[in-house]
Amino acid sequence: MGNDLTVRGRVAVVGVGESTYYKRGQSPDPEFVLLLKAILAACADAGIAPSQIDGFCSYSNDRNDPPRLAAALGLRELRFSNMQWTSGGGGAAGAVGNAAAAIVAGNAECVVAFRSLAQGQFGRFGQGGGSRPISGEYAYQIPYGKISPAQSYAMRTTRVLWEHGISRDTMKAIALAAYHHAQNNPRAVMYGRPLTPEAYDESRWIVEPYRLFDCCQENDGAAAVVLMSAERARELRVDPVYVLGAQQGGPRRSGAWADNNTDYATSSFKHVAERLFAQAQLGPADVDVVQSYENFTGGVLMSLIEHGFCTYENANEVLTFDNLVAPKGRLPLNTSGGNLAECYMHGLGLVIEAVRQIRGESSNQVPGAKVALASAGPMVPVVSSLIVGNGEALG
Amino acid sequence: MTERNHVLPPGLPAPAPMRDGLDAPFWAATRRHELVVQRCNGCGGWQWGPEWNCHHCLGFDIGWTEVEATGVIYSWERPWYPVHRALAEAGPYVVLLVELPHAGGVRMVGNLVGDPLQPFQIGDRVRAVFEDHDDADTPFTLVQWERMG
């Protein structure tokens, strides 16, 4: 990958912000207002006026379109807008990458990557309601009671555990680490609601092999990240967080219907991770802290392996609670509480946490963190992953 | 098969052939209790789910071939929490991903017939059970699976 065709080091995150995070149905604000508040918070964090924004990137068919946002935020001109095609939250890191690409290409100067998702207002992801006849891909799944996201992806986890002899204890450790971190994060919906190993073991099956605490929450919230060129970022603040790599993609026939993707037992990160590390000119051992999208803990397990943070062979030894918790674990994971215990912000909250770790502002700070990774959307047809770092990491 | 022998209770959406006609041959075959999948007339490649062109050779000359209605359990899950009102009393039930080794390894989603807590594992052989829904507004047939031997 030639250096003249990369975003590495040329774009930085200058501001991050989120709305208050709520359990689904408890937001007093509609989704659009949550988003405005998140973007305003991110602008305040960056020290810019909202009118300086000139581009928007989002994913997962976000309902809040850029022209409406541009009017509400006083933009002088909307120069760039972009929607990442993929289901689930697979575009969270991809939207940041698309924003960075637009800036490097000169199409925009100040781009906001955002996601707003009020499941109370617009319907739960964990319920599938109708009874009218359906056709196409759904016809091969829904009549068999394979309906919800958990039901869509549980079988992949079954297959991975079986193929590689991986214990469900790894999934339990991932859930316990997230809840542990949330107890130090006042933003987290699960702040003040610790999870014990016993409570995990006794929690109900949602769909085997996922128990309740293996599944993400359903929330109301919004999050936003402001990106500018590295040069302008350095004028704005002393601690810009550089984009070192951002990649997205889906492997061969990842969108094939009804679990017929060619390589079945994958989170879809094998090629994305390889390209990501090549772009960042780093390896897994250089990453100080990992934010790995949890739709379900089984997806995290697969993502960590496919990014090279552990192997199929040593996953049972590496993925333990002690290893996954900040500040002392060897692989600090989801240090805000993530989608499981902070807020299911469709992955953008994980991007924000990666930025906070590099700034030294996390509620579960990894001492001296220079490089952080945020991955998004394991198992969905298109996934994305991002590496950010400080000036020292940029070299 | 009477309704009481269906794996899941009534009230879930019925499958309907796509309006563009792509998968009509599959649903028609299930009514005859036959299992058909796509096979390319050009390169012989097997394909599932239905697509307009061959994902091996990219040709458009795709046919439908009847295959032996047996397979091997490739993966599975067991839902307990009801995500649809029709499933309020249905859990647990087993969803299988069944591989058809004799048809290029294509995979089909269906339910395991019988006790949802019966012992089974990946690799077990299963045979198709055609579950007729004759009382539906537009009758249809689902392809379910039972363990062999």
Image (cartoon, rainbow, N blue to C red):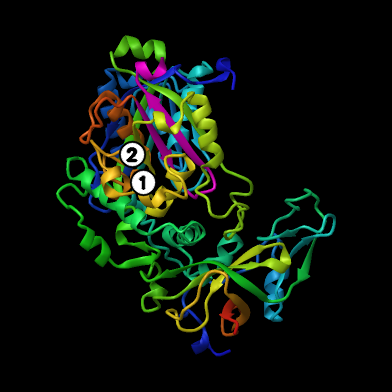
Q: Which quarter shows the C terminus of chain B? A: bottom right
Q: Is residue A377 magenta?
A: yes
Residue type at tag 1: Val
Give the magenta-colored segment's residue range.
Answer: A371-395
Q: Is residue B14 above or below residue A161?
A: below
Viewer-nearest of labels 1 and 2?
1
Kindly indicate whether the residue at mark 2 contacts the one at mark 1 (C-beta within 8 angstroms). Answer: yes
The N terminus of chain B, quarter of image: bottom right
> To which chain does the residue with label 2 belong?
A
Q: Earlier in the sequence, mark 1 or mark 2?
A: 1
Is residue A286 at all visible to an observer of this figure?
Answer: yes
In the rendered structure, the answer to whether residue A236 lies left or right of residue A88 reads left
Query: On the image, numbered disc 1 is attached to which residue?
Result: A318
Q: Which mark is residue A47?
A: none
Counting from the top left corner in percent of width and height, residue A366 is at 25, 31
B52, B129: nearer the viewer: B129
Mark 2 crowd level (few <14, some 14–19, many ≥20, 10 Å Cα)? many
Name the residue tied to disc 2: A331
Question: Where's residue A2, x and y in %?
Answer: 59, 18
**Badge 1: few (under 14), some or many (20 or more) residues near its Cα, within 10 Å?**
some
Residue A28: in magenta span: no
> The residue tagged with tag 1: helix, strand or loop?
helix
Gap in angstroms between the C-alphas marked 1 and 2: 8 Å
* Along the viewing direction, whichever of B133 and A378 lies nearer the viewer: A378
